[in-house]
Image: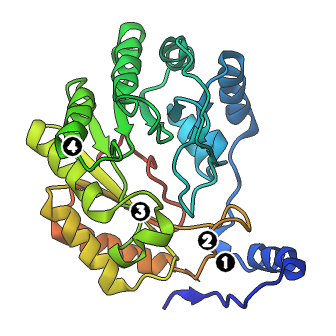
Amino acid sequence: MPIKIEQPEATQSSQAAQWRSEITALPAWLRRPIGKASEISTVQQVIKQRQIHTICEEGRCPNRGECYSKKTATFLLMGPTCTRACGFCQVDKGHAPMALDPEEPKKVADAVQVLGLRYVVLTSVARDDLSDGGAGWFAKTMAEIRKLHPQTGIEVLTPDFWSGKDLQQEQKSRIQTVVEAKPACYNHNIETVRRLQGPVRRGAKYERSLEVLRMVKELDSSIATKSGLMLGLGESEPEIIKAMQDLRGVDCDRLTIGQYMRPSLEHLPVQEYWTPEEFERLGAIAREMGFSHVRSGPLVRSSYHAGEAD
């Protein structure tokens, strides 16, 4: 069974103690060295010089040293401020994000070339303030990477491109812009089970996310699709299995399953820590369902081993 975390009601004076307690209570399998300092420093210098962002650094991903050593990285496009306010994410929130840097696509492409990256994942904050939700920016960045480093595989991890008006055709048009740029894989995370979508993904909807993945396959069935789940927010195993079935129902090819780890006291608390053995079992169930590429483990994140075959 997952390790349950008791969550007593915390007063303001006890919040800091509660946070320290939660950190101390991390199970051993979640305590991992951050990676080789030299490899991390090299990437940090390259992105700092170009004033660009990676989710590896913004989120201090525990796998970044391993990914960097394998020549993979995940770039965060369109600035570090998101127009959504999901309960699990530590990216800054705001209704007036910074203006797009017109040189960002070229800067990202230059970083890919300098670092000799074999595989990159392009993700972004949600930019509901932009007329196309940022879809064209994904396509432009992909084109710039291919100009300088055509051998690099490119995966995209996009928001849902919802316009705020429930206009499915508008959403499909935005997704089509990205699909026509021919990513190696199109990733969009449902993040959690249906019951927990409200508190976890403010502004997003379970069915809408499934529709993103369905649309990608409808537009180009040759593009692999992918999604991810976080565990530890209070979901049950039957709910997880149902979410996996729903993903297979829209022909989703690849799946990542990892442990949610609370970024700060302002974010949703961890309800439980799932064990490595439970992650292995869920991964086996996913493979039996027909997912072609499965990564399931406590420290797995959306881009973990992204460019590798199962």
Q: Taking 2 as reference, is 111 above or below it?
A: above
Lower position in the chain sequence, tag 3 or tag 2: 3
- For the residues labelled 1 and 4, the Cα–Cα distance comes to 34 Å
- For the residues labelled 3 and 1, the Cα–Cα distance comes to 22 Å
Q: Nearer the viewer, mark 3 or mark 1?
A: 3
Q: Taking 305 as reference, is 239 above or below it?
A: below
Q: Nearer the viewer, mark 1 or mark 4?
A: 4
Name the residue nearer the viewer: 249 or 275.
249
User: Which residue, given by chain and number where applicable, does mark 2 sit on?
Assistant: 268
Lower position in the chain sequence, tag 4 or tag 3: 3
Q: Taking 20 as reference, is 222 above or below it?
A: above
x, y (%) of residue 293?
A: 27, 54
Q: How is the image coloured?
A: rainbow
Residue 32 appears in the figure? yes
The quarter holding residue 220 reads top left
The amino acid beneath tag 2 is Leu
Secondary structure beneath dot 2 equals: loop
User: Which residue, given by chain and number where applicable, does mark 4 sit on?
Assistant: 224
| Residue drawn at (54%, 11%) of the image | 103
Do tag 1 and tag 4 residues touch (Cβ < 8 Å)?
no
Secondary structure beneath dot 1 equals: loop
Name the residue nearer the viewer: 284 or 140.
140
Q: Nearer the viewer, mark 2 or mark 4?
A: 2
Q: Is residue 161 left or right of residue 148?
A: left
User: Which residue, given by chain and number where applicable, does mark 1 sit on?
Assistant: 27
x, y (%) of residue 70?
A: 50, 36
